Image (tube, helix red, strand yellow):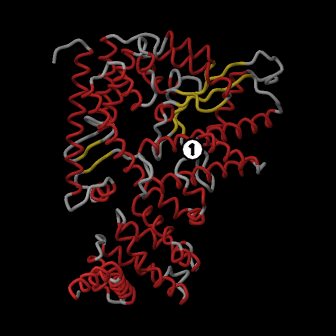
Amino acid sequence: MRSHTEAVQQIFRSLFHAAEEATDGHEAEIWALLRELHHEERTLWRLQQLGFRELNEGYQNLRLLHDGPMYAPASPKRRKLLYAVAPALFREVSRAADPDRALAAMANLIASIGARSSFLALLRENPSTLRTLVGLFGTSAYLTQVFLRHPELLDSLVRADLVQVHKDQLAMQEELAVRLEKVEEYEDRLDILRRYRTEEFLRIGINDSNGLLDFTEVSQQLTGVAEACLTGAYETARAALLRQLGLTLMPGRLAIVGMGKLGAGELNYNSDLDLIFLYDASDDEEAGGKIGAQEFFTKLTQRLISVLQVQTREGYVYKIDTRLRPSGRSGSLVSSLAAFVRYHQTSSQLWERQALIKARVVAGDPALREPVAGILEGVAYAEEIDAAGVAEIDRLRSRMEQELAREGMGHFNIKTGRGGIVDIEFLVQMLQLRHGRRFPALRQRATLPALEALQACGVLPADDFHLLMRGYRFLRTVENRLRIERDQPVEALESGDEQLTSLARRLGCEGDDAAARLLTDYQNQREAIRACYTRWFVQERGQTA
């Protein structure tokens, strides 16, 4: 009986008391860290034992966290709250993908809100909020900067709608419309657009960093935000221009066409919006008054771009790129439907047809969506490309790699470099233009559905299908991690980059060799993708390898 009861007692203690003893030890260690900050060398040693790499920077952040900024030194009440929350705080920081960055962001956030001890009380009472905040800081420099610029968004962390993982585009559009209807001033509407976009990026980023969304779901959510903001911006610009010109009706209808990642529903963080603008003039002579349709819709488009791009106290909504319009920079900002069709029948180049594969009406007059969609698809798949067209697409791909990738020893570009995302996209688009006229099912805008259609139609063998699907998912996931990490578009991997380890950790690689294993996986994938790309282009050009 004694042997059995002793065994039960050991199991009981391991389940119920070991965690308490470990917690007590952890608390004592963290409290000692804070109380002995005046012993700099001892503090640096403790930080190293806790897994921090930037020791001097970490020490300064600890002082800021403990003492507060010079203009708002910590009160006794605030310091007491800090000691109460510190063990849980450091436990979450040590688990972050980048503990150094998580600590720095937390110290700067606390400093930015000054003497608000209520913030520390909130963290003590809401462990999930603390976990979410630290996890975000350790994952994304981009969203961290959003928080540090707008600390008032902290209140959003406890809002119920923030934890909503998925929202459809219509729901976002209705949410934004309700907010815009509550204000009349033009400047206030601009700020609402920017605030909504920031809050939605925060919602998506938190769910992304918590592993609740894969890269395809992130793209869908980001695309939905962009479409909602475009619709809100269009209505804002339209109402302002009609009021300015003293009109009640527009001289026609406008379709806003999304190109590239927006049209395909594949947006990433920090993506610009590639747009073209098409209008259908009205037969009503009274509509528009004395102003012609071309002039009116040019003014409307300019106002719309201003609504989205102008910098206010809330920042901007999106950067807009209109270079894919007919004739590029030298062409009109807007085109009539007739002029657009005529241009593509007589003057456009193959790369412009290739770009229209992803084109989709994303905002504007709903009545134009279906007719414009038919025009876009008709132009893109007007005729099947021949071997010369295949060679032209390959030539353009090679030029992109030479001029944009800039790869070298230890420097890789996952988008435009060898075996990168563009290899897969150009291969898929070549096969769509090659076979899409005969097989309407191939007329997909997004890459993954297009790959599935190519296999279903018998164009792409199973082995190549699985290779390209696996490679595309891997590369887009890495791209997504890079872009959420930094506050700018990033496609580069550096073999000696210190951030590569934290990137590898966020991608699920563990251990001291996580960065090396990530690079090995990437190099294997890109060589397989390039081999597949080369084989197909050689075959479709009718050449022998």
The front one of 282 and 370 is 370
Image point (46%, 71%), residue name: 106
- Of 470 and 521, nearer the camera is 470
* Residue 405 point in image, percent of width and height: 30, 38
> 436 above or below 411?
above
Name the one closer to the observer, 212 or 229. 212
Amino acid at circle 1: Val
Q: For this view, does 189 lie left or right of residue 230?
A: right
Instruction: Locate the C terminus by quadrant.
Output: top left
Q: Which residue is mark 1?
A: 225
Q: Residue at x 28, y 39 (%)?
A: 406
What residue is rendered at 23% in x and 39% in y? 525
Residue farthest along the left direction in this orientation: 545
Location of residue 471 in the rendering, given as x and y in whole percent from the top left corner: 29, 37
| 45 to the left or right of 304 | left
Q: Secondary structure at mark 1?
A: helix
Question: Does residue 348 lie above or below 206 as drawn?
Answer: above
- Residue 522 is situated, as x and y percent measured from the top left of the image, at 24, 44
